[in-house]
Image (cartoon, rainbow, N blue to C red):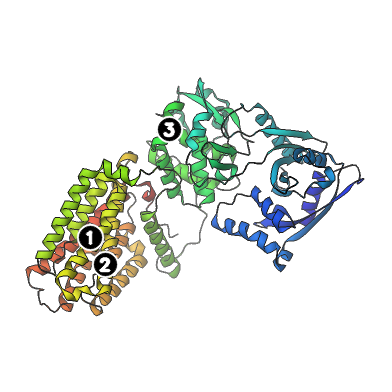
Amino acid sequence: MSKAVQDTIQALFASQGKTQPVDFEWRLACRHGRPFMLLPVDPKVARTGLNLYLAQRWQAKIWRRSLPWMFRTPLAGFFEPIRFQADASAEIIQFMARQVDIAAECVFPAAIKISEIGSSSRLVLLLCDESGRPACVIKAGLNPNGRMATDKEADFLAQLPAGKLGGVRLTGRISTPTLSAFSMDYFPGASPHDDAGLEHLFHDWLNPDEVILLESLPVWHGLSAAVGASHLKAWRQINLALAGKTIHTTLYHGDFTPWNVRVVSSRNLQAFDWERGDRHGIPGWDWFHFTVQTAILARRHSVERAAAEVEELIHSMRFKKYAAAAGIAGIVEPLLLAYLLNHVWVTKPSEGCRKTAALFDLLAAHWLKKPPIPAVAALPAPVEPCPAVSWVAAGRQLAFAARQWRDLFWEPSLNFRLQASWRKEFQAHWFILLITIFLLAVIATAQFYTTLHLTFLPFYVFTCALLAWKAGRRLGALLAAVAAVVAPLVVAARDVDFRVPEVVLWNATMRFIILQMCVLFVDRIHKQRQIVHHRPAGDSQPVKLSENWAVVLASATFLAIIGVLDYITNPHLIFLPLYLFPCMMLKLVSNLRWGITAALIATAIATWVECLTNQINYHLTEIFAWNFSMRLSVCLLVLFLLHRIRKENILFRNRKLNLN
């Protein structure tokens, strides 16, 4: 490894001799076993040099923060030292000195990010001024491929229209027999966490006076020639949908991702790495790329979650306004599918290509009239067959169930949504808020004047769900939090046995869980009505219960444990959410019928345990029937909400668990 890095450094600082020696010393930091960064040995300078690296994953962020600290400890010995004696008269040294306006022999050791070693060797250098602050960034290509890419980017930046938001200003350029390089000012800021404010940039990049036939663009011809046989059928459908469509072209970055963007504010940002730039690009593709590649590469989302991020984007008001301005309002979906094909067949990235192809297959099956032939690249890696009844199969079934459960509560986060203030929400929905507060008061009063052992939870659920449907989740969640506390306090006000703090707190927590789940599910269904308009017929790809025997066994065991805990603990404690979880799990991995069956069993167990543990013998009275029906109605409501979510949410489009 040292030899390859030394050769790269030798090519960078090549000179005729060493009339004015300048000593440089770095420590080599690797990533995935490959050279990644050369950091100066001084921990303070190394911390500054790490500004070249905009870490995205939490592991990378920890690694980035730890490096300067490690350089101060004996752990620094784990990083290979790289020493080199350059010549102050070397052209690259002179170029570096001019960019920061200091003498060549006083140039600080630059932090160097190694983009590649081999066929396309490219380096990124961060230079500091005399005070040690980052001042300039230099990109250099060393071999023919690297020099070609560097020259192409520099040529593009030289032609970049002045005043464009996010544009890079070229401050210098050099070409020697061994390298090509250009410089630009260092720009502070962090990489964006989502696409907040990026709509200003994409609107600014549009060419409003240039209307052109989409299929006449060179990039479209290149894509048409590159699409492989596995996607030709889908490509013909996309081409047919976009035939004769005109668009406003846009300034196109080509690799617009968080790690290539630094943001101070929505009006003060800069994009880097314009190797794939195009002054007459296709609108929307950079925005699609930002969403898709952030989901796949940075956040490691599943294909289904990436699809949910995409649907959230294209149905947002921010994107719809942009699509109208760009002239793509009616062709967003086929245009997005075309972007995915371009990324798979033209860009051909070294990482994430398989998931991008799988995302295309999922969205194309969801959006096009007929599903495409799956791409070979999108197929999962072959796994060894395993018996249906084995520890391996059980692990896969439980992992599948856990993933379904997580997806139920996960929400897209890459599309920024401006949240209205509480004051504005109250002003907009004061009437329905007053109605639901009045209903809550009526229910609490009825509960206070009736038998203590009657449950009124479905009425509280209905009230909170109504507000969530009409006014949104925030107000619904607020009312749910209030309702969760009201019921235990009403009961405690009537009977001293219910005034134990542990009982009040536990019962409020249990009610809070159920009410918040219902508010969340109702709000999600309400949003899906605005997003989903390609609804699959029926319950897509239902899974047989026999194929999830491990989940059935785990659910039954969990239900039995809850029943025992309910029996041996204080009879005034409620366990309804815990009884409900196994029913939800069976619905998630199978179908509604099995979920309802589990709900009947769980409700019967909960009500029977209540009869056995309470001192009042009312199991043959109307109280038993009332509480059984109330619990069952809550369980059924949650299950039907899950059924609706699963039917319409692209997160649950793929249901079949592959055990082979």
The picture places residue 418, in percent across and down from the top left corner, at 40, 42
Please report the residue visible at 22 percent of the width from the left and 47 percent of the height from the top: 433
The three-letter code of the residue at mark 1 reads Cys
Q: Height in image: 5 above or below 100?
A: below
Residue type at the position of mark 2 = Tyr
Look at 58% across and 42% down and name the residue there: 262
Label 1 with label 2: CB-CB less than 8 Å: yes
Residue 487 screen position, x and y as percent: 20, 64
Does label 2 or label 3 sit earlier along the sequence?
3
Residue at the disc numbered 1 = 635
The residues bearing labels 2 and 3 have C-alpha atoms spaced at a distance of 44 Å
Q: Earlier in the sequence, mark 1 or mark 3?
A: 3
Q: Secondary structure at mark 2?
A: helix
Q: Quadrant of the N terminus?
A: bottom right
Q: Quadrant of residue 242?
A: top left
Secondary-structure class at tag 1: helix
Disc marking residue 579: 2
Q: Residues within 10 Å of mark 2 (few under 14, many from 20)?
A: many
Q: Position of residue 14 (x, y in %)?
A: 84, 43
Kind of residue at disc 3: Val
CA distance for labels 1 and 3: 39 Å
Q: Position of residue 354 (x, y in %)?
A: 53, 47
Q: Which residue is mark 3?
A: 332
Query: Of residues 385 and 50, which is closer to you in this image?
Result: 50
* 484 with respect to 349 (left or right): left
